Image (cartoon, grey):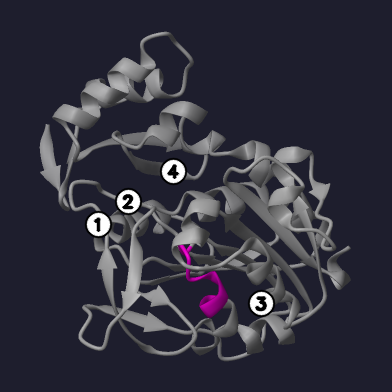
Amino acid sequence: MHQDSGSYTLSRPLNRLLAYYQTRRWRGSHRLYRFLRANAPGLCIRHETPLGTFIVPAAEIFFWIVGGPMRYYMDELGYFFATLQNWHEPFILIDAGADIGTVSMLTHYHCPNLARIIAIEPNPRAFRLLEQNLHELPIPVELVPAALGEEAGQASLSADPTRLNDHEGQIYLSADGETDVLAVDSLLTEPPANLAFKLDVEGMEVAVLRGASRTIRSAARVALLLEVHPDVLDCAGQTPEALFEAAESLRPMVWHVPLLGNRKVDRTTPFLSQLPRRQYDVIGLSVESL
C-alpha cells in the first residue's frame, strides 16, 4: 500500500481483488465496506473500464451498492443518456458538482455525440481524483476547481476532511472564504448548440441556474439533470418547486422522474405530494428536446 495524492492505493493484485468484490453481489460486501471505511478511509480502488482507469474511494457506499463506477445509478441515468443519444447532434456537458467524475465518464461512454465536458468541483480532495479519472478521455475536458453560484465571489466549503470526496459537502458564501465561486455564464464564450447540464450542488441549485441564465436561454436544446433532495432543500429553505421555477423562468421545461419509469411530473401539484418523500434525480427537458 502506498500514498498517492492524499489517498492510498493498493498493490495490483490486492486492488484487482477488491475491484472484483466491489463489482459483484455477495453476502459479505457490506461488512467489507464497513471495515475499509473504519480502517482505511483514504483507500482507493482502481477499476479498469472501457475508457481507461477510473479510481473510486473504497469508503463510499454507493459504489458497493451499485457494483462499481460503470453501474453508477444507471436506473436513473439511463433515461438521461437515452435523451442525449436521441439528439443525434454534438452536445456539451456541464457537470456541476462533478465529484470524482463518474457522471462525466458515463456520459462519454454512453453518448458518442458528447463533444466537450466542463466539470466543476470545489472539494480539493475530490478534484484530485476528478483530474485522474478524466484525463484519458479523448475529447476536450475542462476541469474547474471552484463552486458555482449566481455571480463571482468567494465561499467556505464544509466537507468531511476524512473522506476523499464527500459529495454531500456544502458551500457558504463568505467574502473571506477559500473557495472561488463562479457563474456558469463565465465559463462559455459562445452559446452551446445543445446543452446537457447536471446539477448536484447541495442547495445552491437556484443560484447556479440564475448564474447560467444566458447559457440556458441561448442553447438550442437543454437537458437538465437535477438532484431533488428534500432534507437538503429544507436546510436551504427551498422546495422542489423553487428549483423547477428557476429553470422554467429561463425557458419552458417538461420534467420527468427516471426512478419511476421516467414518469412525468405534474406541475399543478407539489412534487412531494405526488410520490414518496426521498431523494430523486429529475430530468428537465426544454420543449425543443421532446
Q: Secondary structure at mark 4?
A: strand
Q: Is residue 161 left or right of residue 27?
A: left
Q: Residues within 10 Å of mark 3 (few under 14, many from 20)?
A: some
Q: Is residue 145 visible?
A: no
Residue at 20% from the left image edge and 86% from the top image edge: 176
In this view of the protein, which residue sits in the foreground, 287 or 177? 177
Q: Is residue 166 visible?
A: yes
Query: What range is drawn magenta here?
Result: 201-208
Task: Give the Cα distance between marks 4 and 3.
Answer: 37 Å
- The label on residue 166 is 2
CB atoms at circles 4 and 3 under 8 Å apart? Answer: no
Residue type at tag 1: Arg
Instruction: Nearest to the eye among marks 1 and 4: give it.
Output: 1
Q: How far across and down, in percent of the image, does residue 16 sit?
A: 32, 23
Residue name at image x 27 percent, y 24 percent? 34
Separation of disc 1 and disc 4 at Cα? 21 Å
Going by the numbered disc 4, the residue's amino acid type is: Gly
Mark-to-mark CA distance, 2 and 4: 24 Å
Q: Decide if residue 153 is on the left or right side of residue 79.
A: left
Report crowding for label 1: few under 14, some 14 to 19, many 20 or more residues within 10 A (C-alpha).
many
Closer to the N terminus: mark 4 or mark 3? 4
| Disc nearer the start of the sequence (2/4) | 4
Dividing the picture into quarters, in which one does residue 146 lie? bottom left
Residue placed under numbered mark 4 in the picture: 52
Kindly report the distance in space between the C-alpha atoms of the residues bearing marks 1 and 3.
30 Å
